[in-house]
Image (cartoon, grey):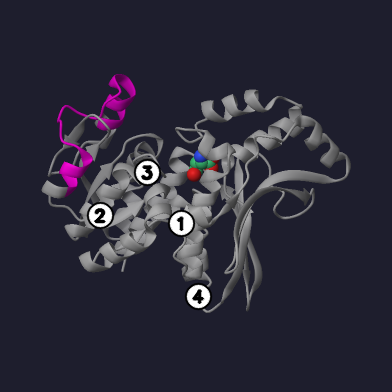
Amino acid sequence: MKTISVSIIGFGAVGQGVAKVLVDKKEYLENLGLDFKVVAVADSRTAAIDENGVDLNAVLSRKQDEGVVGSEKLTGLEIIETIDHDVVVETTPTNIVTGGVGLQNMLAAFKHGRDVVTSNKGPLAMKYGELMEAASEGGSNFKYEATVGGAMPVLNLAKDVLAGNSITNVEGIFNGTCNYILTRMMEEHASYEQMLAEAQELGYAETDPTYDVEGIDTACKLVILANCVFGMNATHEDVTVSGITRITPEALLLAQNEGYVIKLIGEVNDSRINVAPKLVPIDHPLAVGGSLNVASVQTDLSGPITVTGRGAGSVETASAILSDMISIYRD
Ligand code: HSE
């Protein structure tokens, strides 16, 4: 059995999802020869630390009941810098102005030679090159499937599963909140504001939902795709973006009468990175409803490969993190 010591830095929906799946999949992981021992958990105010393994069920209950993970006052950064462990699961909220604490956490992890698995888009969309260099200098593994499309596998699909193919274009729906709002506005003829409130209640939206509805979240995911799959060195400033705030129920109805839906489509290839609402024929593979994400990867050898899945959600996003953790340590 290989024991891998883990910190979970950030204990919102995704961090809690990671804790849950590590508990639920303990036996499954042991069958793979992997024992992920969580030695530290941090939220924005407190920490729980135990070098013999934090009791994840107790931490989850405490977070639920008291709003904190523990009684220690160490920050995530202090944990990364002072507690010896193998992998940092970085699940703090996205900040695309500065990269936020996530950027500092990741750089510190690499400086200490730790591996990083993350769902945090901000640092990758802002400082991709710097992060890759730091990971390489630290001899660290760095995996971030959860940053694009939640549970929907697209980065590892394009990079690993489709190895041997040249990827010429990726397009799709990369924001569950916008898809939910547009779908429900069309189905219920409801107002934009009402549906945004619902998407927030369901936990799909970013802490600042303007990231979702103005297309910024999709732009960040396209930047990550551009850099990871197309080898660019793009930032979100390289993306032309328009969001969904001006789409009316009347426009959706008109489109529907002509056999179309309106979707916020992101597209990346080596000449452009673009986010905009587009008309999509109702029977097209990209016309998925609800909060689903979809990605169509255009390849030279295999033609188009289209995947769809849940782009947001606690356990769903944690599944992408878990799969990255397994792929680092299984071999
Ligand atoms: N706010 C994002 C969405 C969460 O709605 O898709 C996942 O990145």
Are circles 3 and 4 on residues that touch, CB within 8 Å?
no
Please name the amino acid that badge 3 sits on: Val
Where does label 2 land, which residue?
Answer: 107
Badge 2 marks a residue whose secondary structure is: helix
Residue holding disc 1: 235
Distance Cα–Cα, label 4 vs label 2: 29 Å
Question: Mark 3 against mark 2, which lies toward the viewer?
Answer: 2
Q: Can you identify the residue that label 4 sits on?
A: 163
Residue 76 located within the stretch drawn in magenta: yes
Counting residues from the start of the chain, the first of labels 3 and 2 encountered is 3
Q: Quadrant of residue 268?
A: bottom right
Seen in the picture, residue 118 relative to 14 is either above or below; the reply is: below
Point out the tag, 3 or 4, that comes first from the N-terminus: 3
- 3D distance between C-alphas at marks 4 and 1: 25 Å
Q: Which residues make up the magenta segment?
A: 59-80
Determine whether 199 is above or below 217 in the image.
above
Q: Amino acid at mark 2?
A: Leu
Badge 1 or badge 2: first in the primary sequence: 2
Foreground tag (3 vs 4): 4
Q: Residue at x 44, y 51 (%)?
A: 146
Estimate how packed mark 1 is, as few (under 14), some (14 to 19) or many (20 or more) residues with alpha carbons within 10 Å: many
User: Residue 21 has which mark?
Assistant: 3
